[in-house]
Amino acid sequence: MQYLLIIGAFQALIALGMLAAGHKRRPADSLLGWMLACMCAHLSIKFVIYGFSGSMELKAGFNTFIDLAYGPLLWMYAQKVHNDKYVPAKQWFLLLPTLLAAGAYLAITYGIVNEGVKSMSRYIDMYNRSTERLIIASFLIYPLLVLNKSNTLPSFWASERKLIRRMAKLFLVVPNIIWLMNNIADNMGLFSVETRIIVIRVVAYSNIIVICISILKFRLFQEQVVSGECMAEEQVQPTEPITETLLVPEEKELHIARKAAQADLELRRQVADKLLLAMERSKRYTDPDLTLEKLATALQVPRNLVSEVLNQHLEKTFYQFVNEFRVKEVIRLFNRCKQQGVSPNILSLAFEAGFNSKSSFNQYFKKHTGQTPSEYLKLERRATAETGIAAYG
């Protein structure tokens, strides 16, 4: 048992380290980090109990409160993937059962240290019965909610959806089957209580390790995909195999490298064209809540690839790129008002173009035109009046 626990805790720690050290992190990844931290703490606590406690009651029959955190964290992760504007902290109350169980767990542990296991047996039994019901309910409700939410994720989030569904199924199926089989064995008098509990623990901890490995595999795949390596490899397959076999190794490597660079450049040009079309035809910039994540999802292009194209190919940040189109839209609306002989409401037109604050609108408008919106309109009116006078004269 100790070996299983230490391997699982080490596995969770490695996955957590890779998640924290990666350069291609997404907003939702922090919730995966919290889940891995909980798994590492869970298995480490059990390792300490099994390694240093001589009491079978503690080893086999003292539920860990961390089980109650997995369901809410998985639900928050699914919510964050679905909507990057989702703020997990606003649903902190979902972790309230975990916090209350943690308080009870620490209080009982303190009592065990000071008074011994036997004196706390009654409290351990009460704690186990209460947390068991909560854990089963959590592993039933949250995975079902998550599976339903995963059906609404767009195809762009295919790898995230696959991970979410896998974790939800593992949290739903394994604990509930364990609970059901344990009740059947208990009613039929099969095996001793200690044996059943040990088997339950082994299966439960193995399930956590499988989930850790799933997250680790997802992270490795995510690093590969968002860097564009998969796309580049597909486009770099040699189309002239006979010619390449005639090249010496050094020339062949150079030839492949050139083709890879060309494919990478062509990929970025295609993404740049997609970005411009999204702005010019679809007018994505009019969405005041538009984010890099949201735009990448709409284009079905990895977020980090969109960011790289903006910064390196178009030489603009995301907000510079979007707000320049918004300024152009405001100027177009100004001209339409002028043609209709209507005095424009500057702020209303700014909001219509996608700006969500007066300060950012004024800042970007002046940066783009060299004038404030009011100055721009005054010059336009003056130019129109001079044109009219000249025509009349």
Image: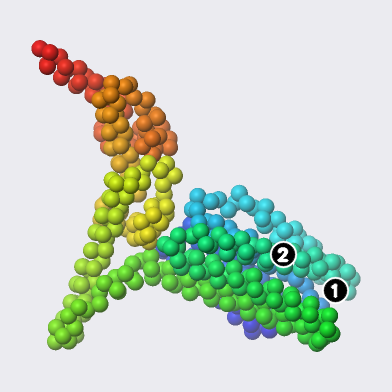
- Label 1: few (<14), some (14–19) or many (≥20) C-alpha neighbours in 10 Å: some
Left/right placement of residue 296 relative to residue 28 reads left
Q: Which three-letter amino acid code belongs to the residue tagged 2?
A: Ala
Q: Which residue is mark 1?
A: 117
Look at the picture and state if 292 lies above or below 41.
above
Question: Can I make out residue 97 in this image?
Answer: yes
Left/right placement of residue 367 relative to residue 189 reads left
Viewer-nearest residue: 329 or 216: 329
Left/right placement of residue 200 relative to residue 123 reads left
Measuring 53% from the left and 76% from the top, which residue is drawn there?
213
Look at the picture and state if 203 lies above or below 40.
below
Residue 175 lies, in percent from the top left, at 68, 73
Q: In the rendered structure, which disc, 1 or 2, sits on the residue that comes first in sequence?
A: 1
- Label 2: few (<14), some (14–19) or many (≥20) C-alpha neighbours in 10 Å: some
Question: Can I make out residue 304 in this image?
Answer: no
Look at the picture and state if 229 lies above or below 84.
below
Residue mark closest to the camera, 1 vs 2 = 2
Q: Quadrant of the N terminus?
A: bottom right
Numbered circles on residues, count: 2
Q: Which mark is residue 137?
A: 2
> Are the residues tagged 1 and 2 within 8 Å (C-beta)?
no
Q: Check disc 1 and report its element: helix, strand or loop.
A: loop
Measuring 28% from the left and 37% from the top, which residue is drawn there?
328
Residue 153 lies, in percent from the top left, at 49, 60
Q: Which mark is residue 317?
A: none
Colouring of the image: rainbow
Q: Check disc 2 and report its element: helix, strand or loop.
A: helix
Q: Which three-letter amino acid code belongs to the residue tagged 1?
A: Val
Q: Quadrant of the C terminus?
A: top left
